[in-house]
Every structure is written in C-alpha cells, then in structure tokens.
Image (cartoon, rainbow, N blue to C red):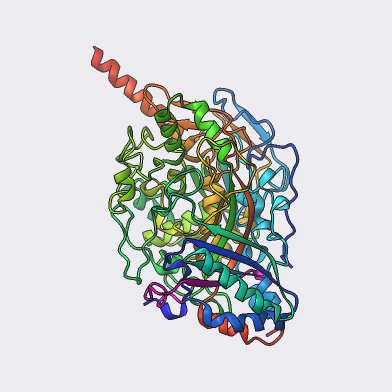
Amino acid sequence: MATRPLPQEQKGERKKPHILDRPRTNDWAQPQAMAIPKTGYFRREEGRYGPTYPKTPACYGFSVVGKVKAGAEQAMRDYGKKIEDAVKSDPFILAPLQLHYLRWILFDIGSGLHFMYQGIFDTDFDKYIEDAIVLFNQSGITTVFTNLEGWPEDWRTNVPAVAKFFREHQCPSFLEYGEYPFVSAGEVKKALRVKQALSDMLDQMQ
Amino acid sequence: MLELEDIQHFLISRPPALTARYEFLTFRRPPGGRAWLKGVLDKVGTANKVGSNQLDSRWVTVAFTWNGLQALGLDERSLTSFPEEFRQGMAARADILGTTGANHPKHWVGNVASPDLHAIVILFARNVAERDRCTREHQKYLSELAGVEVLSSLDLEAIPPFDYAHEHFGYRDRLSQPAIEGTGDQPTPGAGPPIKAGEFFLGYLDESGEQPPLPQPEVLSRNGSYLAYIRLEEHVGTFRDFLRQHGDTPQQQELIAAKLMGRWRSGAPLVLAPQNDDPALGADLQRTNDFNYGTMDPYGYACPMGSHIRRMNPRDTVENMQRRKMIRRGGTYGPALPENAPDDGVERGIAAFVGCASLVRQFEFAMNVWANDPHFKDLGNDRDPFVGTQDGTFDMTIPKRPIRKKITGLPAFTTVRGGAYFLLPGIRALKYLATLANGS
C-alpha cells in the first residue's frame, strides 16, 4: 500500500496554495498583519518535502534555530566575513535565493550557544533549500550549518535530509506584518528603477 | 561511460513508431508477477540495440510502481530506501502537483490511482497491425499465467497530418530533447551544454558534480530512472472556441495560440518569429531552439512570461536550469477532431512520460513552481495555460506595447485523467526482480 492516503478534494474552494483566505495581495499601499497558528500554517497543504508555510504580508520566510557544536563559535563568526567578501566580489551571488533580507544571530539561552537564521524571500521554502544547496556546492563556500548539531553529513547530495533539518529547526512566526504587504523584491527594485528613470528624464528636461 | 547495454531504450532513443499501447498491470500474487517478468525480459529493448536495427517493428519497455516492487516480493529494507515521493505515488501527491478539482485522482480513469497498479508495459509499434499482433501475443501470454491481470490499457496513434509529430491542438511536438553526456548526442544550437547522465539515470554523476545515494540494493537502482506518467485530456472544442473568441481573423487566432504556447503551431518560436509564423524555422531543429530570453526577449513582448514553453524551460532566466531538465516521451490518443467540427465529446489527448532521476527535484518542481505558481515571474494570477490547474479564475498576461493584454478567466484546455510514478529499471535490475524470493 502507498504510505500516504489520497488527499481529500475540497469542494467549491479555489485552490490557491500558500495564500490565505482573503489576503489583499495586490494592495501594497495598505499595511497588513497576519496572526499565524502554532503549526505555522492555516490548513495543511503538502509541499514537495513536507507541509508548506503560507505567504504572509512579509512574504515567504523562515526562522531556523539550531544548537552550535561545542567550540564552533569562532568558525561561525568567521563565516560572516566570508559571506561579506563573497557578496563584495560577486554582488549577485545570492540572487538565486530571491531574498529580501537575511539575518545571522548567535545567542546563548543558558543551554549553550544557539544560532538563528532568519530569512525573508520570494520563493517557496522547498525551492529555497534546493537552490541554496546548489549555490553552496557551486560557489565552494561551505554552509554555516555544518557547525550545528544534527546537520546531515551528506547535505551536498541529500536534499530531503536538509529539508527535514530545516523543518525540524524552523520556529514558525505567530505574527507577521508587512508595511508594503506581499510585495516581492523584484517589484521593489522595479519601482526604484522606474523612479530612477523618471528622475533621469526630469534631469534631461532641465 | 553510460552502460547502454544495461539501460532500457525508452529515454535514450525515440523509435520510428506511429502507434503505441500502454498496459497497466496488477500482480495478484508475487510468483505470478515474477514469472511474467521473466517471460518478457528478452523482449525489452536496450539503449545500445534500439536504433541500430532499422528492421525492428516493435519496442517494449517495462516499469514498476513502488507498490509493484512490493508485489514482486522486494524486502522492506529495499522498499524503504526509495525516495518518499516514489513510495507515495503520484495520486497521493495531488496537492503538490495541482491535480485538484476536475483533475483530482478520484476522477482518473483506468484504475491507475489504485494501489493495485503495479506495472506498466509500454509497446511502441511501427504500425497498427504490428501493435495488434503484439497485443494478441501478450494477451495469450497472460492467459497462460496465474496472478497477473490487465487493470486497463490505452491505445495511442499519431494523428494526421502524419509528416510531423503534433498533438490535438495542432502544436508541433518533439522540438527539444536534452542531449545527455556520454551518449554522443550533440545538443542542438541554443539548447545549452550536454547534461550529466545522473540527471536522468541513477548511479552517475549529476549536475551537482556528485553521485546521489542510490536505493538499495544497487543492482536494482543503477541504470534506472523514474517516470512520471500523465494522461492529459485535451479539450479541442474549448480551445478552438477560445481562439475564435479572442481573434477576429485566422491570423489573430494563430497569434493567440502562439502566445499561449510560446511557439507558433508550426513550432517556430515567438522569440525568433514574433510577428508572423515561419513554418520552415519551426521544422528546422538546428534553428528552432537557438534563442534565449534574458537578452533577446527580457520583458516577454515576443514570448509571454506565462506561456507554456517559457514556464517549462525558462532557459537563461532561472538559476540551475541544468538541474531541472527532463526527457519527455509519449504520444496522442483518441481520434483527431476535424477542423470546424463541433466537439464530439470523445476523449482525446496526450499520454506522456517524463523521465528523470529525481521526481521531487525535477518533475514535481516543474509542476508545483513553474506550472502552478500564480506568482511565477511576478505575474500574480496566471498559471500555465496547458499543464497548470485551470478553473476559469486565472489569467493569461500578454506583454504588449504600450499596455499589456490580459485575458481573464482562462478556461481549462486540459484535464488530467490519470497518472502514476514508475521506476524504469535497468536490465540487470529486471533480472534481479524476476528472480526474487518472497520478501528478499
């Protein structure tokens, strides 16, 4: 027998994965907040490697928390400089991940040093993980996650194992807010390019 | 080097067949399944033989579902070493693939969503007479065996005109075929470099430069591939009505058809022929793929971002394209609907296989992200017009100066009527399966 039953069809409901019941996804001018259940999603929908997390007014994202291996703090901190240099030498090195922001945080909560990796991006969780593995394999930069307990040794070839690690260490938000909700980084950059082009045009009119 | 003598021909070469038959089998008892396999082994075409003998008139391929491997008596340790998506099967992954609503597995025909589906035997034949002869032979063979039954079958035939491959909507087919490193095939201009064999066959280096872990034992998985089967009904009447509704003249209707696909029905790509059809270009495999999007059509004025070919192969406008390539096989079923004839309600469509080394990374990614994500390339409310899940609430955006054209309420031109995931084993693996003891 197959290990998973057939998904139940939801009658009369338009299928629109990752989008909540009535989000005003095209209303960038009106800030929105969204309270999220403890599970991290409103209705369980299967993604390729597990349940999907919804797109919120703050776009897609994650907050992954893991325990740092003993003695690895300096390696973690050195990694920060490595990424800074990599982005300096190729500003678009992280472009495949379709990011808005990334934050790397180290903190001790009394049970040892922990690391939090917070990302906001415009692609779904599973695609982010696949792209990140390819990126790290291609660039020769190893991932900071190798300094965490439980990180799969065969991460370079075992995407499902990495996806499992991310899901097990993901701390879903219970509230997310967007000042310009649901807007992708591409749209933000497009708007800034239009502004720049208009500014250039006005300069030429002087 | 690829072990061509151990790889089934199916994904390597395309034989000169005008007809085909798919038979979906169930094994009521493991010994029956193994006996059946033993008897068909010598008929399965290998990659090094098919194509070398132009006198052949039929070509046989055999593949198994995960339930089928279990039904043959494969042990639990081996069964659990297969990837999750293959173990679950296509029907259980409906949400991921977008096979919802009218496409939902509960509506599928031929019992292919049932856990009783264990194997498929794919017959390609040069003509109908040869297909019928082979069918009779197989029926006779099955009648001599206990415990193997045909759940359903599907006959396929090329549709007129026969001088080029095309499907029921009239689009030229078989325009792109990934060139696999190690086969000696050279990619056509514009198709990118040859792709590492590990993207399609298990046991080889893939585009990551690594060799992914193999399901166990290795003899079972090496030189194998995964197949995603889809039976896609094409609503030809709906499609033609749509073209008439959105184009006043035949020329305008052809342009709308081209914008949906990204190519004219002749096969000529819009990036190279944006205003008028160019049938000679469409038929010329040395030219018809020689384009990119990033520099030649960055805003989609020629080929819309949401068109089928731009979604299914975004070429230079996405990362890691070499890791998303797939090999497609299959053909058309059902009678052609004559031009200007009203829809007759007869089911017709494409029954195709997508071959790859990772269903989740290649096939499911394409369906989940490229075909069905409404926000693909910042579109917002569009899905692939042919393989995306359409229910009349999505749009088709066509970039155009000065203002883009948006067709709202795109109808469903297709409906998924069946599907399954199969392992296409190598020849040594078939022999291994045929000689299994129960639970070994």
Res A106 seen here: no
- Split into 4 quadrants, where in the image is the C terminus of chain B? bottom right
Q: Is residue B381 left or right of residue B100?
A: left
- Residue at 48%, 74% in the rendered image: B8
Percent x, y for residue B135? 60, 70
Where residue B194 sits, quadrant-wise, is bottom left
Where residue B85 sits, quadrant-wise, is bottom right
- Residue at 40%, 52% in the rendered image: B164
Percent x, y for residue B72? 68, 79
Where residue B408 sits, quadrant-wise, is top right
Q: Name the residue furthest top.
A: A206
Q: Is residue B69 magenta?
A: no
Q: Which residue is nearer to you in this view: A18 or B30?
A: B30
Percent x, y for residue B192? 32, 56
Q: Reply above or below: A174 against B142.
A: above
Count how many numbered circles sit on residues in the image.
0
Q: Is residue B71 left or right of residue B128?
A: right
Res B179 seen here: yes
- Residue at 52%, 35% in the rendered image: B340
Q: Is residue B52 magenta?
A: yes
Q: Which residues are magenta?
A: B46-67
Q: Which residue is nearer to you in this view: B401 or B338?
A: B338
- Split into 4 quadrants, where in the image is the N terminus of chain B? bottom left
Percent x, y for residue A38? 73, 46
